[in-house]
Amino acid sequence: MRVVLKYGGSSVATPEKIKNIAEYIIRLKKERYDEIVVVASAMGKTTDELIEKASVFSANPDQRELDSLLSTGEQQTIAFLAIALIGMGQDAISLTGYQARVETTGIHTKSKIKNIGAEKIERYLSEGKIVLVAGFQGINEEGDITTLGRGGSDTSAVALAAILRCECRIYTDVDGIYSVDPRVYKDAKPLSHISYEEMMEMSLLGAGVMETRAVEIGKKYGVIIYVGKSLSESGGTYIMEKGYGLEEKLITGISITKEILVAGISNIKYSSETIAKIFQITTDAGININMITQNISKDSILELSFSVAVNEKYLLDQAVAKLKRDLPEATISFAENLGMISVVGVGMANSTGVASRFFSALSKAGVNFYQVTTSEISISCSIDRENINKAVEVTAKAFNL
Amino acid sequence: MRVVLKYGGSSVATPEKIKNIAEYIIRLKKERYDEIVVVASAMGKTTDELIEKASVFSANPDQRELDSLLSTGEQQTIAFLAIALIGMGQDAISLTGYQARVETTGIHTKSKIKNIGAEKIERYLSEGKIVLVAGFQGINEEGDITTLGRGGSDTSAVALAAILRCECRIYTDVDGIYSVDPRVYKDAKPLSHISYEEMMEMSLLGAGVMETRAVEIGKKYGVIIYVGKSLSESGGTYIMEKGYGLEEKLITGISITKEILVAGISNIKYSSETIAKIFQITTDAGININMITQNISKDSILELSFSVAVNEKYLLDQAVAKLKRDLPEATISFAENLGMISVVGVGMANSTGVASRFFSALSKAGVNFYQVTTSEISISCSIDRENINKAVEVTAKAFNL
């Protein structure tokens, strides 16, 4: 049987850990999978350290060059892992994004995988080699090295599993997907299964375990994704089509984003062109927007607000400067000290009263909520940061999580 | 005017040095060269550190994987340099060996450049960009990353200059080529010019400033090579065709290799097949042989010895193990504590008495010499390591260097 295994940065943080993984993979190959592809991230904090070093040369490093720099982290990990495996007598070969033909499109530091040419990987697998592929990186039409953004190694792994038509097993330092972050809510329960849709909502809403795009690709190509602890196959959560043994709960989980910034734009005349322009500017700045709320007053005055992660403040500042130039009449405001809480569940789509149960739980606990957005399977709202733990607790109780 | 500039590891050892080089190159582009290609090595001791790290995973790391690992060093340097240049307002772009289409052939860790596709570099130059190329690395027919061995960045730089039809300027921490190593002979004089042939002999014989293959390529394609101090264009030595203002001295220089190992093979019947087999084994082991001396006794018994650099002892051990298996009747001996001294000069070819003047200088000073080899333009001999300084001094005096 064939499989793609993915090890994140903390799982390969030290030479000792890499050696343990090498030994473990050799055992897996003997006992469980005859064809193994491994995707690995850069060791520990390497990516952050390289970004730090680049900042010595420029406050705003060129993104193409940053991608070329960052890609060396994963290249080193897979070379070390290959050297370890071969040293232990197991034939193996490492492939950079270019060598594995991971073709990408889009802007540097946030590229998307367009295609993967699997011929080379198939050939090496058929020769009995363990194939190690650098996560997080690819190559664009220009032949430039690109990276896929934070969590991009998950996307690499699932995309490879889609092309190679096999399961993708993602190893981390947690033992699966929890309905609520166990660091925030001590009674949280791990899930044995979760549907792609719920996992996407939870990722988008800040659950942080899996990259959303990875789950999206998994859903599109029907890749079964397992998330579990390194060096173990027990426990863990399977992400798959709903119905697959999935208990139909009203709410599967609660997601939180501890720190968000909310930008408000008001005092301008509503027009769809203006709104399109505003979001073109945020897109050009490369901002990931979490939540959008929009209201039109009776005088056709637009009230728009959107939230972004705190670590994208520098991008937001660039966008705001441009917004002020292009829409001089607008009033632009910021709200800080906010967080976001969301309830997620496929059950919600066919059920009523989830919103009222959620809001009344918050309200009874004295938690004010501001911007509210909803999707088919989730409801999110911004709350004061200091209320996050309390909000999680009362919501978890309200839905019996 | 177009130029290739090459900066070695010690010239780019710190962020500060990289920034200084960036500023300096921008000035060169304004004042002297409108099209600049820069070849850079890995920062400081990076390559050695990566080799050290790899050895944690295997005593004998797989060579393909080692190449992929080591290539990240140069990739990081050129990304940093590009980030610095772009941050200073100078358009620039970095290219890995693959991106610059440096095609290689031969074994891993010691590959040779077969071709460089210059179209991409030409295009970026015509757009006004400074083009930064990772030295020391290329890509083979398989698409595997290869490296060119120690000093390979010199080869990358001269090969690029050959393809781009321009001068190659190699910046180091010495102010040119000396007739004798100034650390050994304090009265040594720097040369303003030296011929390719003499430079090759001196490199082969251990002068250590320039990689021999680089000079060879320079000679083949008529690339004028300048060797001088970083951040300066004054002083320095031009390596070019003889006749180009070159004073015709009898001896241009003295080369030394401080530490060599001499392996002796004796007690076997002479046959050309046996000798061919011996050197096939050393070649397979990847050994660079400095000096071969061979003698056939009157009973057709072969006496053969060859010397290698001390840092190739581990390769020699592999070869000796194989020799013992394949030629069980042979006696194999080692001599350690030896060094090598050579006199080099194109004048030698048309002159007599160089050998006798050299040997008598050594002999008068009480320096024993053992293996002796000669070429058209050099004479080398092994001597006791403790006599090296004395030997250099008396030889330099004997030839008025």
Image (cartoon, coloured by chain):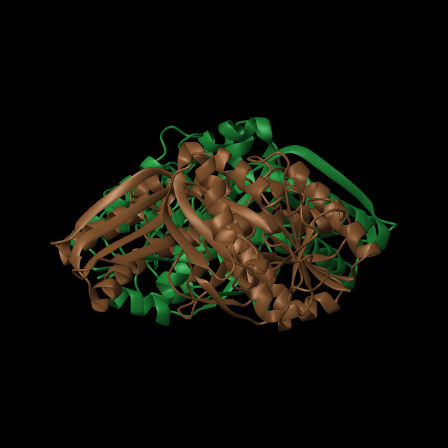
Chain colours: A green, B brown
The extreme left residue here reads B329
Residue drawn at (27%, 46%) of the image: A22
Which image quarter is the C terminus of chain A in? top left
Residue drawn at (51%, 48%) of the image: B357
Residue drawn at (39%, 51%) of the image: B372
Q: Nearer the viewer, residue A329 or B158?
A: B158
Residue A99, horizontal then vertical, whole percent: 43, 64
Would you identify the image quadrant in which residue B96 lies? bottom right
Drawn side of residue A391 relative to residue A244, left or right: right
Drawn side of residue A45 relative to residue A176, left or right: right
Residue A70 visible within the image: no
Would you identify the image quadrant in which residue A276 lies? bottom right
Counting every numbered tag in the picture gives 0
Residue A338, horizontal then vertical, whole percent: 62, 34
Residue B261, horizontal then vertical, whole percent: 34, 43
Residue A375, horizontal then vertical, whole percent: 53, 54
Query: In the rendered image of this protein, does residue A296 appear above or below residue B114?
Result: above
Residue A291 visible within the image: yes
Q: Nearer the viewer, residue B37 or B154?
A: B154
Which image quarter is the N terminus of chain A in? bottom left
The extreme right residue here reads A329
